[in-house]
Image (tube, helix red, strand yellow):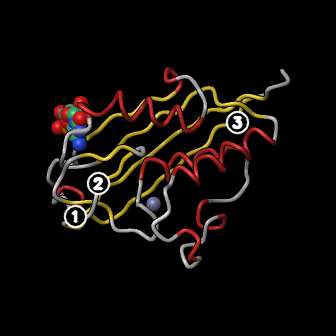
Amino acid sequence: MFRIGIGFDLHRLEEGKKLIIGGVIIPYEKGFIAHSDGDILFHSITDALLGAVGYGDIGELFPDNDNRWKDADSSTFLKEAKRIVDSLGYEIVNIDSVIILQKPKIKPYRELIRENTAKVLEIEKSKVFIKGKTYEKIGDLGKGLAGECRTVALLKRKDV
Ligand code: CDP
Ligand code: ZN
């Protein structure tokens, strides 16, 4: 009746790039480097959803050597993962994510990010939670060289 999935993503941060998390542009001097828009939250939720139904992963479905996904808006990946979940007969119970970022603070943008993520997934905002956490200045994450996101997603069969 239930299926659970885990997702992880990390991208390097570079000066002069737009910082996009959960489809929300966050004012900061650095942003993620990636083939797509580098949205670590959307990438990690996409993998958690695909993993929960055992349908492969983001790199298989949207290869980064495919020019269709160059600078892609990552909501496309998330929408497709939701469509797959739905077509296999599952609905989202809840999603919970940790965004590991030395800077900036995520908390002021939490509600905006939750709202936007819920909108993309066409689910209630109460089913999506996110929080930021630093890496206590340790290692590359702690030096602000990269940002990471970890997600768990719980699904439930729609017919029970
Ligand atoms: O206090 P502790 O060392 O456990 O955690 P921290 O990494 O210093 O973060 C403290 C709090 O700041 C977190 O619990 C979040 O509420 C917030 N935070 C955030 O909103 N965005 C970040 N990028 C990092 C932390
Ligand atoms: Zn990514």
Residue 7: give x, y in percent of width and height: 52, 49
Amino acid, disc 2:
Leu
Q: Within 10 Å of the Cα at label 3, are there few (<14), some (14-19), or many (20+) other Cα atoms?
A: some
Task: Indicate which label's residue lies in the foreground, 2 or 1.
Answer: 2
Q: Earlier in the sequence, mark 2 or mark 1?
A: 2
Residue 97: give x, y in percent of width and height: 43, 38
Does 6 sit left or right of 14 as displayed?
right
Q: Earlier in the sequence, mark 2 or mark 3?
A: 3
Q: Nearer the viewer, residue 36 or 156?
A: 36
Q: Is residue 156 above or below residue 126?
A: below
**Beta carbon of the mark 1 residue lies under 8 A of ligand 1:** no
Residue 133: give x, y in percent of width and height: 26, 40
Q: Badge 3 is on which residue? A: 3
Q: Badge 1 is on which residue? A: 145
Amino acid, disc 3:
Arg
Q: Within 10 Å of the Cα at label 2, are there few (<14), some (14-19), or many (20+) other Cα atoms?
A: many
